[in-house]
Amino acid sequence: MENKKQILTRTYILYVFMCLFAFGIIARICVIQFSQGEEWKAKAESYTTQLHTIEAVRGNIFDANGALLATSLPYYEVAVDICAPSIEDKLFKDKKDSLALCLSALFGDKTKNEYLKILNRARNDKDRYVVIQKNVSHKNLQKLKTFPIFRKGKRGGLVTLQTNKRERPFQWLAARTIGMSRKGIKPVGLEGAFDSVLVGVGGQRLMQKIAGDVWRPINDENEVEPKDGSDLYTTIDINIQDVAENALMKTLIKNNASHGCAVLMEVKTGAIKAIANLTRNKKDSMVYSEDLNYAIGYAAEPGSTFKLASFLSVIDDYNVSLDEKIEVGNGEVTYYNKTIKDAHPPKKPVITVQEAFETSSNAATAKLIMKYYSRDPQKYVNKIKSLHLNKQLGISIPGEGAPFVKDVSHKQWSGVTLPQMSYGYETMITPLQTLSLYNAIANDGKMVKPYFVNEIKRNGIATKKFETEVLIDQIVKKETIAKAKKLMEGVVENGSGKGLNITAFKVGGKTGTAQIAKIGLKKEHGKTVYGDIGQRNYMASFVGYFPADKPLYTCIVIINSPSNGIYYGGLVAGPVFKEIAEKVYSGSVDFLKPINSGKDLLTKAPRVITTKSNELNGIAKAFSLPSTKVESEKYVSQNQRDTTKIALSENSIETQLKKGIMPNLMGLSAKDALFLLENHGLYVKLQGFGSVKKQSIEAGQKIGKGNKVILILS
């Protein structure tokens, strides 16, 4: 009995405890439901509903003539809310087969029946967000909106999320210079340098988290609209870039070279018109691509192109004559344990300074520099530094290589350093720095900073313009510049660059051939160490300017590790320079002269506004100005010197063309200019977009059928 009582007591206690616990739970539920309900509901929504950042459309990158180099194209994730209240059962039943068929035909990844199963399953499961396709183009999205059910617009159940993909219309052309900017990847090129300008300001969109950790938009519109990025207008001319890359590619393949670069720069401004960097594919030796920017990022021993700096120094410091004699013997000279040899034995034992530069004599260069600077080598080093060869150029593109010019106090300075430096060794500079030095000579001593961007625009309005930046007003005396030009023009006329003579114009420049030590594992004192393994690669180069009488462009070409047995700069890099120069010359209005240069113009060409008569009459009427009446729709001119009236003249474009005289085409649209000129038998080439701002044959010149006319458009 006693045990039974104890058991009952314990049971009652447990029962009471369970009842109290149940009442506690019920009370807590009531508190949460009625007292704290709004608070917990808000917290729940905060976990399932969030504002997501909407990426802004990245700004475009254009070339100097307005051609598109990089742009952001919209792509969409397309989903369907087939259970939307506006999609009634009858509508779904009648149109689902047609919708499935259209989806299958558009995307081609599933059959009609497979798409039908997806739609039916979503309808039966009350699934409000089923992804149909990702990476849908804008063009295909427009087609989707015309499909059955979807054509109901916002009530058709079609849900889209936009993403943007960066595309380069010209593919690999200037790819490394254009560069990229992505999360998790170090930004490179113009995309990286101007990322803050191009990126824009992101917007916001309210999204809801549904089953499967999928986020779907709640509204059809964004809460905060994104602001698109600004556009970048570069100095690159895509037509010249195409010429440079193709010329470089052909030479790399022909010489089985590892990699190479070519850069073309405007002499007066420093604007880079083309920059090509090609590297051989490791898997396919016949394929080259733009992977690394050698022209900007890689400092190396320049070889014989550095001799210009040495000759500039000694001529400027000691007024050395180009006729001064240098005894070279058989083309060898020894300093301590280092024998310096010429690539080819000299034709005579004594040569002039001019001949030493023309034939790229290492022995003569070393002897010349040692003669004047051996007692004070730091003076030579200081002179080299005064040419801006020890400093970075500070260009806008990230990753510029650091130059290295050794001081006498450097721990690695030795008795052979000065003669070695004189012809391009024990010094590190980038190709772009070498180009800048040669450009300064072409520019009569003014060194300008290379630049890649002309202006930044937002919604078509310029927000920032980049002007020419002068690094050094006068790098050496004007007399030294004149001698340097004579040296470089002599290289092409008589020396190592003789094969680069161009019929239409003269060129000045310098060839270069550098030996590059191959570094690898080797045995030394019984240990395996990294060092010079005795093998040599070659770097062939040519750098110069054209036309020599009035330099407009400088160009550098470097070919690394040619392996078909030919490695001299004039033979390997020179042909690339020549092809670029010839094609730039043939396609540029700047080089062309009037066809009857030196003679009086056949007519005087006043500054005019040129358009159709009815359009100009309309302008006169709008501004309440008196005008002469020309009833026919002819192309007429208004003399800008008379602003009091609109005075039309029929004796303009059409009349002058009939007489065989080139009219003034300024301000005429490309369409009208093309129509008029080709109707009179002229061959027309257009460059750029918009209206005519420059013409290759001046107004008033005599013309005939078949003449070529180049029109530069604004």
Image: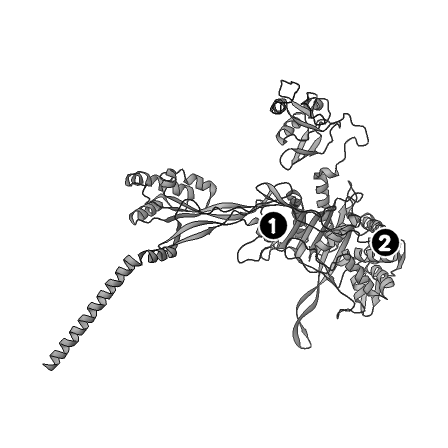
* Residue found at the very far left of the displayed protein: 1
- Between residue 167 and residue 504, name the one nearer to us: 167
- Please report whichever mark, 1 or 2, sits nearer to the chain's N-terminal start: 1
Disc assigned to residue 355:
2
Q: Is residue 449 visible?
A: yes
Q: Is residue 667 above or below residue 304?
A: above
Q: Is residue 95 left or right of residue 534?
A: left
Q: Is residue 135 visible?
A: no
Front position among marks 1 and 2:
1
* Residue found at the very far front of the displayed protein: 35
- Give the SS element for disc 1: helix
Residue 421 x %, y %? 78, 62
- Residue at horizontal 73%, vertical 32%? 697
In the picture of the structure, the residue carrying the numbered disc 1 is 178
- Between residue 44 and residue 448, name the one nearer to us: 44
Q: Is residue 589 left or right of residue 189?
A: right
- Between residue 542 and residue 293, name the one nearer to us: 293
- Give the SS element for disc 2: helix
Disc assigned to residue 668:
none
Residue 31 x %, y %? 28, 60
Q: Is residue 665 left or right of residue 495?
A: left
Res 37 → quadrant: bottom left
Q: Is residue 2 above or below residue 505?
A: below
Q: Is residue 141 above or below residue 607?
A: below
Q: Amino acid at mark 1?
A: Ile
